[in-house]
Image (cartoon, rainbow, N blue to C red):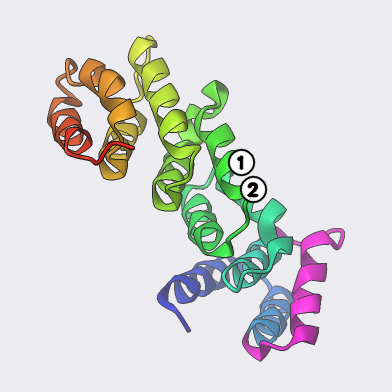
Amino acid sequence: MEDDFRALVDRVRASLTSPAEVAAYRALLALVRERTPAAREELARVLVAPEQPLWARETAAYALGTIGDRRAFETLILMLNYRDPVRCATAARALARLGDPRTARAAAALATNPVRVHYALHPIRLLVELRAPESVPALAETLERLLAAREHHWSIARACVEGLGALGDPRAIPVLTKASAYPQLTAAAVAAIARAETAPRS
């Protein structure tokens, strides 16, 4: 079992509070390990069945997402926008492996949402990993807005700067230059500009 899934299993198991929940979770894990078409159908039903606990939907979505089953997309995007950073990180890892063409657009919408800035870190990191056409515009838009805002949210702004550096796109140089004027971002912005300046131009 891969490390990410093992961490998910351990986290969920620690949150269970009754023998019935433990039994239900063991049954769910048995479906995950079965890896048959019938088991996959059962996992997909968990995503849409009424009154399923959050841990069941998360586990089923992660298992389906990491094998490229696009029925997991909606649940994983919901988790990516969740208030728990650990769940966001788990969803981002599954979405990166899912291969759904809708992922980058959804991640960009979350990253650029001004009322969800506290939860933008993992959508930003996912956009960097995807290297999609939406990635640079979304990170640049978010960074531009944060630099102009009264509350800069330095950790999110730094993630944008570092992400733009990793992407190495010359289009980001103007906003990175603005970011370099802020002491909290100067070192990361200068490094990102250097990478963008040496990137091949299309």
Residue that mark 2 sits on: 102
34 in relation to 194, above or below: below
75 in relation to 107, above or below: below
Where does the image place residue 175, in percent across and percent down from the top left? 30, 20
Where does the image place residue 36, in percent across and percent down from the top left? 72, 88
Where does the image place residue 12, in percent across and percent down from the top left? 56, 68
Which quadrant would the C terminus be assigned to in this image?
top left
Q: Are marks 2 and 1 in contact (CB under 8 Å)?
A: yes
The residue under the point 80% across, 77% down is 42
Could you say whether the residue bearing mark 2 is in a helix, strand or loop?
A: loop
Q: Nearer the viewer, residue 113 or 193?
A: 193
Direction from residue 138 to residue 150 in the image, left or right: left
Residue type, numbered disc 2:
Arg
The residue under the point 65% across, 82% down is 32
- The magenta stretch is 33-54
Where does the image place residue 185, in percent across and percent down from the top left? 20, 26
In reply to whether residue 44 is colored magenta, the answer given is yes
Total residue callouts: 2
Direction from residue 2 to residue 190 in the image, left or right: left
Can I make out residue 17 in this image?
A: no
Q: Quadrant of residue 41?
A: bottom right
| Residue 124 disc label | none
In reply to whether residue 9 is colored magenta, the answer given is no
Residue that mark 1 sits on: 106
Specify the principal SS of the magenta part.
helix
Could you say whether the residue bearing mark 1 is in a helix, strand or loop?
A: helix
